[in-house]
């Protein structure tokens, strides 16, 4: 499991020093965000007074610090709406910001636009967005409610997005890295709810609800003009994107892999997709780019009807569908008890076919998607995950229930995940033909690496210890010459966290 549940180091954003000021916008205070931001210092709070404020603010070079962030917020316990403007906020080259308790509506460009100002080597970073609500947008083209270009180390939590532009995304990322979307609600999208493209990497999308997700509720990848990739030499649209424990209802396709490499879609519930269950595509065809492949689809619950039964997969040209790992999914066609199953490009290992998952009270626009007692989904997951939260915030069992909700929670109390891994992990080649090269950097402590096979068994003679002296930068080569072809998992664990990297061994 790719560990990308990014708690992000700046949860301390809520802690301010006693010297911090509150800069009020409206009610006799500052005229708008621009004038308040011009005076803001690390630790300050820019607070919008209750009521409606005009959008259209553009702010550059607004920086808090790791110890003293800058907060942009609506007045507590009040309704604060930022209405109209091309963008509600245009934030360029900013860092250590928290945005909270605001509503946005009626923008004619993008709702909130956060970018690196075109300076690709200095991304905007350490941005926290929580409890904000996008009510709609005043545009119908390729317009996004939250647009991020060149943003690293960020979280978007407990927000809602409604009525997106017909040709745009509710959230669009170009060249963004180390981010988490958790506990959000998306309803009535245009083209996509979340799109990750242009060299976007290390993103976790977990425990979100997608109601009417548009063309592709989550577009893992896409099509980006070559000048806009971050980094400029990226050879993928999206890499190491993790989609875990989400619920999807509606959408032409809940999930699309589009120029995506080494991404995973695991333990999600997908209810009545309108045309396809999964799409595998390649839209960026320049010769430098890897073709879409080496992705994982596991432990998902697909509840479909005739609309998405033939075919369930839409597979385009210039892709590598035979490199996908597909396993432990439950496929149920409510319209055909004799259905022969989806057109998976490779065998869905340990698939459960056409057994009713006994969802408690599902509905297209929401409901209770918990498998009831006796469901074939309970305890039928692969068991390869660890310390992963389900849609309701409970830890999955081992083996877990298939789908987004763990049904067996008798002694499974709510828990917070351990911190994400702070070190960097690179492996090559993938697919491997007998040897796997591993580079670890910025670990800062000692640790252990090892390889497990698809059944979870440790591969002999692949365990290595990394001592604290060499942990800053370490390269090792592991041999799998005596192992059969198939999928494997490299696990690297230290006091700084856990990373799991899947790879394919071909012979």
Image (cartoon, grey):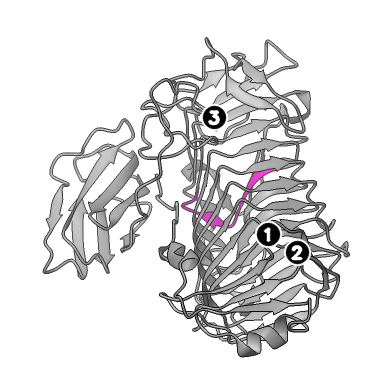
Residue 221 visible in the current orientation: no
Estimate the spatial distance between the alpha carbons at disc 3 and disc 1, rounded to whole Å: 24 Å
Tally the marks. Answer: 3
Pointers 3 and 2 in contact (C-beta within 8 Å): no
Q: Secondary structure at mark 2?
A: loop
Q: Residue at 78%, 47% (x, y): give it.
A: 214
Query: What range is drawn magenta here?
Result: 254-263
Mark found first going from the N terminus, 3 or 1: 1
Locate residue 303, reporting x and y percent.
66, 25
Q: Which residue is mark 1?
A: 171
Q: Which residue is mark 3?
A: 403
Position above or below: 75 against 219 = below
Pointers 1 and 2 in contact (C-beta within 8 Å): yes
Within the magenta stretch, is there residue 302? no
Q: Residue at 35%, 54% (x, y): give it.
A: 419
Relative placement, left or right, of 71 versus 411 is: right
Q: Which of 482 and 6 lies nearest the eye of the viewer?
A: 6
Locate residue 203, reporting x and y percent.
51, 57
Q: Residues within 10 Å of mark 1 (few under 14, many from 20)?
A: many
Mark found first going from the N terminus, 3 or 2: 2
Relative placement, left or right, of 298 versus 167 is: left
Residue 76 image-quadrant placement: bottom right
Relative placement, left or right, of 214 versus 220 is: right
Q: Residue at 58%, 51% (x, y): give it.
A: 319
Estimate the spatial distance between the alpha carbons at disc 3 and disc 2, rounded to whole Å: 29 Å
Locate residue 82, reporting x and y percent.
79, 68
Relative placement, left or right, of 503 versus 469 is: right
């Amino acid at each position: 499991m790719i560990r990308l549940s990014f708690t992000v180091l700046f949860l301390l954003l809520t802690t301010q020093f006693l010297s911090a000021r509150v800069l009020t916008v409206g009610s006799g205070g500052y005229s708008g965000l621009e004038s308040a931001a011009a005076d803001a210092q690390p630790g300050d709070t820019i607070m919008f007074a209750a009521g409606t404020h005009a959008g259209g603010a553009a702010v550059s070079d607004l920086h808090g610090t790791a110890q003293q962030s800058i907060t942009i917020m609506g007045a507590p316990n009040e309704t604060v709406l930022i209405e109209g403007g091309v963008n509600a906020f245009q934030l360029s080259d900013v860092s250590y910001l928290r945005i909270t308790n605001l509503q946005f509506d009626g923008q004619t460009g993008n709702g909130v636009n956060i970018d690196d100002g075109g300076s690709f080597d200095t991304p905007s970073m350490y941005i926290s967005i929580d409890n904000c609500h996008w009510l709609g947008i005043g545009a119908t083209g390729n317009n996004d409610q939250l647009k991020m270009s060149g943003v690293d180390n960020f979280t978007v939590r407990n927000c809602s997005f409604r009525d997106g532009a017909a040709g745009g995304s509710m959230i669009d990322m170009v060249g963004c890295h180390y981010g988490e979307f958790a506990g959000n609600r998306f309803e009535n999208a245009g083209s996509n709810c979340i799109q990750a493209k242009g060299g976007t990497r290390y993103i976790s999308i977990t425990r979100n609800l997608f109601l009417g997700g548009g063309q592709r509720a989550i577009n893992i990848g896409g099509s980006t003009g070559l000048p806009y990739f971050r980094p400029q030499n990226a050879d993928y649209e999206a890499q190491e994107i993790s989609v875990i424990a989400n619920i999807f209802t509606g959408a032409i396709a809940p999930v699309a892999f589009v120029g995506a490499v080494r991404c995973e879609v695991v333990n999600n519930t997908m209810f009545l997709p309108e045309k396809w269950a999964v799409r595998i595509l390649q839209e960026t065809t320049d010769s430098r780019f890897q073709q879409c492949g080496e992705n994982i689809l596991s432990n998902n619950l697909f509840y479909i009807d005739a609309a998405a039964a033939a075919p369930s997969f839409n597979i385009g040209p210039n892709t590598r569908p035979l490199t996908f790992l597909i396993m432990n999914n439950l496929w149920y066609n409510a319209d055909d008890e004799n259905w022969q199953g989806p057109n998976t490009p490779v065998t869905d290992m340990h698939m459960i076919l056409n057994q009713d998952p006994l969802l408690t009270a599902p509905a297209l626009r929401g409901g209770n998607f918990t498998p009831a007692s006796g469901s074939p989904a309970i305890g039928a997951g692969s068991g390869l995950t660890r310390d992963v939260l389900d849609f309701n915030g409970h830890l999955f069992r081992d083996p877990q229930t298939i789908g987004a909700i763990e049904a067996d929670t008798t002694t499974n109390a709510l828990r917070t995940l351990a911190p994400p891994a702070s070190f960097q992990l690179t492996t090559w080649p993938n697919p491997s033909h007998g040897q796997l090269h591993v580079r670890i950097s910025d670990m800062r402590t000692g640790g252990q690496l090892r390889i497990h096979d698809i059944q979870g068994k440790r591969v002999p003679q692949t365990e290595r210890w990394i001592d604290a002296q060499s942990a800053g930068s370490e390269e090792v080569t592991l041999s799998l010459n005596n192992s059969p072809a198939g999928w494997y998992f490299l696990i690297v664990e230290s006091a700084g966290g856990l990373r799991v990297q899947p790879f394919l061994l071909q012979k």
